[in-house]
Amino acid sequence: MYKIRTYNQISIKGLERFSRENYEVASEITHPEAFLLRSQKLHDIELPAGLQAVARAGAGVNNVPVERCSEQGVVVFNTPGANANAVKELVLTALLLSSRGVHQGLNFVQQLDLKQPAEEMAVYLEQQKKHFAGSEIAGKTLGVVGLGAIGSMVANMALSMGMDVIGYDPALSIEAAWRLSSKVGKMENLQSLLARSDFVSLHVPAIEATRHLINDDSLGCAKQGMVLLNFAREQIVDSEAILRSLSNQRLGCYIADFPTPELLGHDKVMLMPHIGASTREAEENCAVMAADQLIDFLENGNIRNSVNFPSLIMERSGGSRITLSNHNVSGVLGHVLSLLADWQVNVIDLLNKSREQLAYNVIDVEGEVSDELRDALANIEHVINVRVI
């Protein structure tokens, strides 16, 4: 019986993926093999000794102590792409809000005199609507920074709306490239993209390399009056630089999903309360994806969409399965195989992959694996943990 401890409100569709025969899932589990969570911050929470995995129903893992998990051999999963459509639709909303005066018009109408006769109000509105005239996004250029699951959907959406689209992503994966329309122009650097774009939408992760990616220097290259949309992460943008660029009119408008005190109340800033993935469908998709990844890992040792371990998927070959994580140094796998040979255990199939400082091995063997053999494998130098499935 596998034990899963949940944090936050997890969609019932995700929880239903766990069979009652094989899983105990609750928020009060004391000795879990896995955590399943959304926004719960784990940095101040002790990781139980038997914890094998943490699955975050969402793309970002800022609330998970990934380095500490890696030290203990705990696999951290996220769910990239599961909420991509929700964010894409909000980006479209932001594009229209920034170009059509919708937000300003709504506020104006709410301040009308309720006692004014309808005929007079209609005449008055006809006189005032010129103050809320905007422009169409068709024919304008959208620059997309980061062409992963969300960025590629945003780019393709903008093309369908009649926009010209250019993109910049120095780490564009083959998988992401397949999702992307060939009509998206590829830019060599961020500065060139900013100089050509009427609108720019950010879709990069919050890592040290992207901290304050949008700053005084990069905004100095922006096309005059450019609109900047940030539905990625707060840390990517230097808020003080945004205010300076709005003041000198280099930046025409800033719309973000991450309010900060210094930006509140500015007439050229529209801020949303981090609702990019706040749809019923996105929450269900993330929960189902996180649950499925946990199940495949716990039952088969397979890893898909981990932020700290390599992706590794191997079909079962019968017998028993050994999964083993270790520091990525030479000789560990050789010692493992030598020990299996000494114990006269026949290897049917194996797969080994590494990612930065960690390596992960899946080994199918004939027959049963004793507790003594498992302990012997765990005692090999540089081995972090061993599981027998």
Image (cartoon, rainbow, N blue to C red):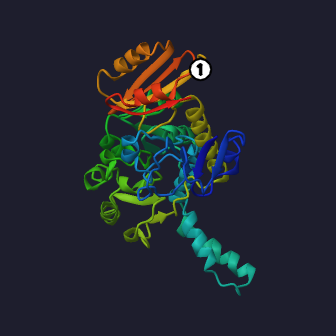
Q: Reply above or below: 84 against 119.
A: above
Residue 13, image x, y percentages: 70, 46
Residue 143, quarter of the rendered image: top left
Q: Please determine whether, in this image, residue 295 is positioned above or below residue 175.
A: below
| Residue matched to label 1 | 316
In percent of the image, x 60 and y 40: which residue is there? 289
Name the quarter where the C terminus is drawn: top right
Quadrant assignment, res 196: top left
Along the line of sight, the residue nearer the viewer: 74 or 128 = 74
The extreme bottom residue here reads: 115
Work out which residue is located at the far left of the displayed protein and give it: 217
**Viewport quadrant of the N terminus:** top right
SS category of the residue bearing label 1: loop
Q: How far across and down, in percent of the image, does residue 181 sit?
A: 52, 30
* Front-lying residue, 185 or 271: 271
- What amino acid type is highlighted by mark number 1? Arg
Residue 60 % position (x, y): 47, 48
